[in-house]
Image (tube, helix red, strand yellow):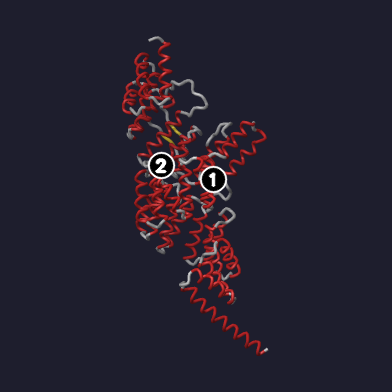
Amino acid sequence: MREQETEKLRAVVRDCVTKHLYSSAIFFADKVAAFTKEPADIYMLAQALFLGRHYRRAFHLLHSSKIVDRDLRFRYLAAKCLEELKDWHQCLNILGDANVDEHGNVYDRNDSNLMYLDKGGEDHEINIASAICFLRGKAFEALENRVQARKWYKAAIRADPLCYEALECLIDNHMLTCEEEASLLSSIQFGPQDGWLSSFYSCLIKKYDKENVVEANFGELEKERSTSTTSDLSFIHTLKTNTDLLACKAEYYHQCGEYQKCFELTSFLLEKDTFHLKSTLVHLAAAMELGNSNELYLLACNLVKDYPQKALSWFSVGCYYYCIKKYDQSRRYFSKATNVDGNFPPAWIGYGNAYSAQDEGDQAMSIYRTAARLFPGCHLPTLYIGMEYMRTHSYKLADQFLVQAKTICPSDPLVYNELGVVAYQMKDYKKALWWFQKTLAQIPSPLGEMWEPTIVNLAHVYRKLKMYNEAISYYEKALALSTRSVSTYAGLAYAYHLQDNFTAAITYYHKALWIKPDDQFCTEMLSLALADECHNNIDTERIKAYV
């Protein structure tokens, strides 16, 4: 076979791969490799076999070529075959021995002597060492060695910032705390043309900052307008309307408690890209908070039809049943979601919450503990464990777990609110006041209705400390956020009552009873307020008579 004919067949193989005609690619690649026996052609055949799902045959070809010990590409493709075959221990053996520290620094003496046959590698290619680090991380994660998996994912993203999948695994699987995520991003060495990528990655990490980090990070790109070309500005503008970025904004709105705003944005994104699963997850969460069961039902039906193999689909069914308060069914589907993908955090949280909603605290705690073990960078399982202990009046244990949640995520206002509630229940009102004030300091302004209970809690503390004017002020702020809370009206009435302002107290007791006519506290206190006002009027008349 002449060189010209050989090159023609190589072009045919490449074209077959492009057109997804893998059997044809395997047929012609086999003929070329048999004739030339060159490593590049053997690799081309192995690649075609891999794409055609002939993983065992591809591995046998690579392993028998003897080049696998000297060429990183051969080694990596052989390991990918073992990944598909779920042979994780052999996959790690093929990749070779290597050590990695907590910061993602790799120490591998063997790889420094390896031959890499592709001399035409350019800057637009992802570093093969980064891909190998990522594959090591996946293998360790499959073997449930999450400590090593986390280290190798960090090594992968540090070896090449373009290895997005490594960062995605670290973020989606909550392997890092807020501080660790920020530290990792600051340690990545981006290229001179990758400023936009640095800002984009910053938008992907946890979003509990006081300011809108999405807009702030892309605001940095806006500052570069004066030095950017027209094509650069067009690219930046395109990024600002990108679906991935807008999904990050939707996540931020959800974490701020702006559920309606989040729901509207995700609705727009799903109209634009119906199958964007990240937007779908945030849309589910917003619909849950808004109690939009119809939207949850439609979304669940479509997901189960289109993605029956994904945990998100069964999670959405669980969300629907949870929303309509059918907790037994919701538990069943949350459990199914965890069986489909054990690394899907929302399913574990929903599973625990479904048990908690039925006051089955032991089962809920068991699930939360599992989630805390699987996702050490996620503070929600630890937070919910603290809340469960609070429900059983184990306030010291609750405080320990809430402090642990604060260590994992020091900027979530909900953690501070729960710490304030624990201090209040333990009658440490000054400490409770400090926690509630710190909660409000962490909340992005303006305050949404989600934070009305925190304002009410703060007002209760002021009332306990006999600072009645401050208490009344915060009760009124709470009423500005929500006018359907019995506890707010009752607390405001009681504060006025303690100030001997019986008329105002009677007014607000009546408003509380209008919302909940059978409220025992308000009924009894209204009777007392009416009696006090009557006695006060009699005393006033007596004083006037003496005067």
Which residue type carries mark 2?
A: Val
Q: How many marks?
A: 2
Quadrant where the N terminus sits is: top left
The one nearer the camera, 190 or 29, is 29
Q: Residue 341 in the image: state x and y as whole percent.
A: 37, 43
At a point 36% along the width and 39% down the height, the residue shown is 142
Q: Residue 102 in the image: state x and y as whole percent.
A: 45, 40
Mark earlier in primary sequence (1, 2): 2
Q: Which residue is mark 1?
A: 249
Q: Which residue is mark 2?
A: 147
User: Which callout, 1 or 2, points to the residue nearer the camera?
Assistant: 1
Quick check: 162 above or below 512?
above
Occupied quadrant, residue 439: bottom right
Q: Residue 537 in the image: state x and y as whole percent.
A: 60, 83
Position of residue 517 in the picture relative to residue 359 (left or right)? right
Quick check: 27 above or below 262?
above
